[in-house]
Image: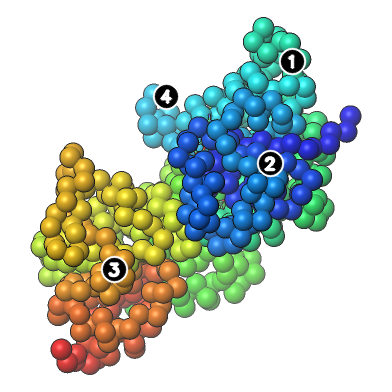
Amino acid sequence: MKYKIKNICCIGAGYVGGPTMAVIADKCPNINVEVIDINKERIDDWNNKDFEKLPVYEPGLAEIVKRCRGRNLHFSNLLEEKIKNADMVFISVNTPTKTKGVGAGKASDLKWVEVCARQVAQFARGHTIVVEKSTLPVRTAEVIKSILESSQSSTLNFSNNPSFDVLSNPEFLSEGTAINDLTNPDRVLIGGDRKDAIEALCEVYRNWVSEEKILKTNVWSSELAKLTANAFLAQRISSINSISALCEATGADVREVSRAIGSDNRIGSKFLDSGPGFGGSCFKKDILNLVYLSEYFGLPEVGDFWKGVVELNSWHQHRISKLVVKNLFGTVSGKKISILGFAFKANTNDTRESAAINICHDLLEEGAILSIHDPKVEKWQISKDLGSKYLNPINNDYINENNNSNISEWSFCSTIYQAVKGSDAILILTEWDEYSFIDWERVSKMMRHPAWVFDARSITKPEQVIKFGLNLWRIGDGYERPTGDIKI
Ligand code: NAD
Ligand code: UGA
């Protein structure tokens, strides 16, 4: 039987659901796309008249939402109604690591996915194709299927006579380049066991993706391929970060090593930039999930191999904070350190698992006073991540925003130059473009000397920094001493 998709509903209006559905709506004007979420504030933000204030910042996203919202793209909390009308339901909800119970600290928490499956089971009418967009452990489709099938026999939804197909269609977008990744994907992966359902989803993608880029597999391969892709990518970063430490110890330069190994076709040049350690909501969670699955299936050696990738990442982040403390004469207590960049990478406002969180926590524990700048992350988000007192940069008063605050003293600064005023050190943690164009002469004059620049993203040009009397450390390259004095 041929299914023609006219109404899509996506459960979950987050970093994946929002941009993915916006692109589907843009590329498929004949399909009506409804994005629903239980979080009312998030939906209000998606419906914001000011397109600069959408809840997700992604280059190019606002323009697409502007074109499609109110036409064939809608955001609402109307779960029941939108599920009822849909021929295809995407599940794009969060799947964080479990914090308690069996598998705590490793397995993915599937409670949100299960709730979605139950909602679909209760409200769907006729035939509905359910698509796993969330990243899920292998064999989750089986769980979803059994929940959906139970509705066919239950009295809850008996009169609507529902029937279902379950497909796996993991998302490979990266934040910061999500729109480009969605419009020009390397591949679209569809896992399923019924040809008609697979074909219906293929037809949606064919509106803008060429046939040879649409890969079809069985459901389990598709689910496992997503976890494996993230594990391989994260592994490359831990590999190069481990080498960066060795470079610093030996006098080699990690960028030269990356270039040398990356020009081998078998290795490839991408994803070899050493940084402050990978962040983002998924790498750590997906690898831990892989570790859990390996152990569950009696393969602890496989689990240990992948666990090492996460452990090295955590060690590497702490290595950077320790190095800052060591160079500031072994103590940062009462010293001002400017943090440039809080997002886990450039071009996103997302801070989930950002290296900045661990590194700032370490420095705050040591007694440092941080002035934090990020062009897209808002103060409330940093406050949530650091859970602490807020230092008003205008009058230097502490505002206790959070009663159960424990450690910290930090301020949020809206410009780089406000952040660096009077500081002993600058620590660059996100590779925002604007940090490559800092006026180091101006900055040097505003700092307390001897002053340091710690560049964990390797985006500064050493000669432009050291000639203004600044000490410089760059990831995987080591130290450069100041060559010039600064006249203050
Ligand atoms: P997110 O937290 O930004 O968004 C998830 C949304 O789902 C939230 O707004 C939440 O309120 C909503 N939600 C939860 N339960 C719901 C329910 N029962 N009904 C309606 N709404 C519900 O998460 P995200 O970053 O979009 O990630 C979603 C999934 O996609 C995860 O499995 C993640 O691993 C995967 N993924 C994420 C990325 C990424 O770059 N963020 C990329 C690829 C895959
Ligand atoms: C990653 C994957 O790249 C996506 O394919 C996947 O869909 C997504 O996870 C997911 O499943 O959530 P994302 O985390 O958004 O995407 O961003 P990446 O570009 O992969 O960066 C992840 C982290 O690695 C960032 O902290 C980044 O700064 C760091 N990184 C990346 C490096 O330190 N060096 C590099 O060379 C590349």
Q: Position of residue 140 (x, y in %)?
A: 60, 29
Disc 1 C-beta below 8 A from ligand 1:
no
> Camera-side residue: 474 or 279?
279
Q: What amino acid is found at the position of numbered circle 1 in the picture?
A: Asn
Q: CA distance from mark 2 to mark 4?
A: 37 Å
Q: Residue farthest to the top?
A: 155
Say which quadrant the C terminus sits in.
Answer: bottom left
Which of disc 4 and disc 2 is earlier in sequence? 2
Q: Is residue 237 visible?
A: no
User: Circle 3 sits on which residue?
Assistant: 427
**Within 10 angstroms of label 3, few (less than 14), some, or many (20 or more) residues?**
many
Q: CA distance from mark 4 to mark 1?
A: 36 Å
Of circles 4 and 1, which is in front?
1
Q: What amino acid is found at the position of numbered circle 4 in the picture?
A: Val
Say which quadrant the N terminus sits in.
Answer: top right
Q: Is residue 106 above or below residue 319?
A: above
Q: Secondary structure at mark 3?
A: strand
Viewed as shown, does residue 269 lie left or right of 342? right
The disc at residue 33 is 2
Q: CA distance from mark 2 to mark 3?
A: 43 Å
Q: Are marks 2 and 1 in contact (CB under 8 Å)?
A: no
Q: What amino acid is found at the position of numbered circle 3 in the picture?
A: Leu
Q: Secondary structure at mark 1?
A: helix
Q: Is residue 479 visible?
A: yes
Which of disc 1 and disc 2 is earlier in sequence? 2
Q: What amino acid is found at the position of numbered circle 2 in the picture?
A: Val
Which of disc 1 and disc 4 is earlier in sequence? 4
Q: Position of residue 167 (x, y in %)?
A: 71, 34
> Camera-side residue: 11 or 463?
11
**Which residue is drawn at the image coordinates 26% and 84% (left, top)?**
442
User: Circle 4 sits on which residue?
Assistant: 102
